[in-house]
Amino acid sequence: MRIALAATCIADAMFPQAPRATVQLLERLGHEVYFPEQQTCCGQMHVNTGYFDEAVPVIRNHVETFAPALDGEWDAIVVPSGSCTGSIRHQQAMVCRRAGQEKLGATAEALAAKTYELSELLVDVLGVTDVGAHFPHRVTYHPTCHSLRMIRVGDKPLQLLRAVDGIDLVELPGAESCCGFGGTFALKNSETSTAMLSDKMSNVKSTGAEVVTAGDYSCLMHIGGGLSKLRSGVRTMHLAEILASTQSAPTPVDVEAAPGRDSEAEAAR
């Protein structure tokens, strides 16, 4: 297939390893991946904060950027983020029509039908659960709220993780509870967000996992920041990074450099 990548603005700015891993994975599976360079934000941040009118030009840029998918230039659009997929699928057309931009809304709706979160694309469209990955580490999975409740990916990420060679996949207690990020929620309701994060981190630590993974780097940023402050040694990695890892080209888990491990490494010397 010919697949266009919507990298997401947070990944482009802060976590480029996720879109890079998405490309590596899909190309290893035999597909052509394209990166439209004029892409920016999908508009989720504006919409979720109530700036509907300001979101329209952002959405227009997204629609114009990925419109070739409607002309057959690409077969699908992949997004390594449940929240951004949710915004494209459930917000863009609504915001455009609210602003009286019916044609733009109709085009956004048509593009949304060709847009998939990574695990959806792999399992539902490409029909694959075993992607040939190798990742010999103890891992636990956090299903992010938008993935779970908005686009309803279900257990697709877990199907993919269970098929990874060498992985020790452990269940996360309270997995379906929010991590407390919620975009601007973490800023506007910081005390509540911190309490929710504390519960999530306690559950992650109880698994003994080396790595906590998810389909959204926004949530991983929140969880990882908290775990780093605790010097837990637990790493955060996007689902794509684990699936892109192979025995000949492993995705590294930098355990020695992990927070809290420096003293242990020094003592070992």
Image (tube, rainbow, N blue to C red):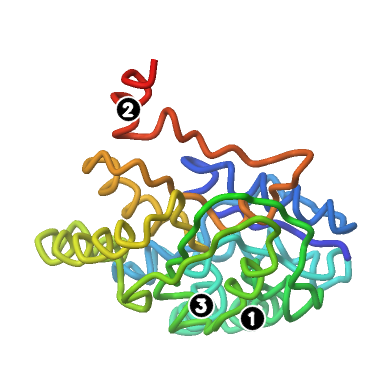
Mark 3 residue type: Cys
The residue positioned 29% from the left and 24% from the top of the image is: 263
- Of the 4 image quadrants, the one containing the C terminus is top left
Q: Earlier in the sequence, mark 2 or mark 1?
A: 1
Q: From the viewer's perspective, is 182 left or right of 37?
A: left
Spatial CA span between label 2 and label 3:
55 Å
Q: Earlier in the sequence, mark 1 or mark 3?
A: 3
Q: Which residue is tagged 1? A: 103
Residue 45 or 163: which is nearer the viewer? 163
Q: Which residue is tagged 3? A: 96
* Residue 78 picture quarter: bottom right
Can you tell which of label 2 and label 1 is closer to the viewer? 2
Q: Earlier in the sequence, mark 2 or mark 3?
A: 3
* Disc 2 crowd, CA 10 A, few/some/many (<14, 14-19, 20+): few
Mark 2 residue type: Glu
Q: Which mark is residue 240?
A: none
Q: Which mark is residue 264?
A: 2
Where disc 3 sits, the SS reads helix
The residue positioned 48% from the left and 62% from the top of the image is: 214
Mark 1 residue type: Lys
Residue 203 or 241: which is nearer the viewer? 203
Where disc 2 sits, the SS reads helix
* Disc 1 crowd, CA 10 A, few/some/many (<14, 14-19, 20+): few
Q: From the viewer's perspective, is 241 left or right of 147?
A: right
- Of the 4 image quadrants, the one containing the N terminus is bottom right
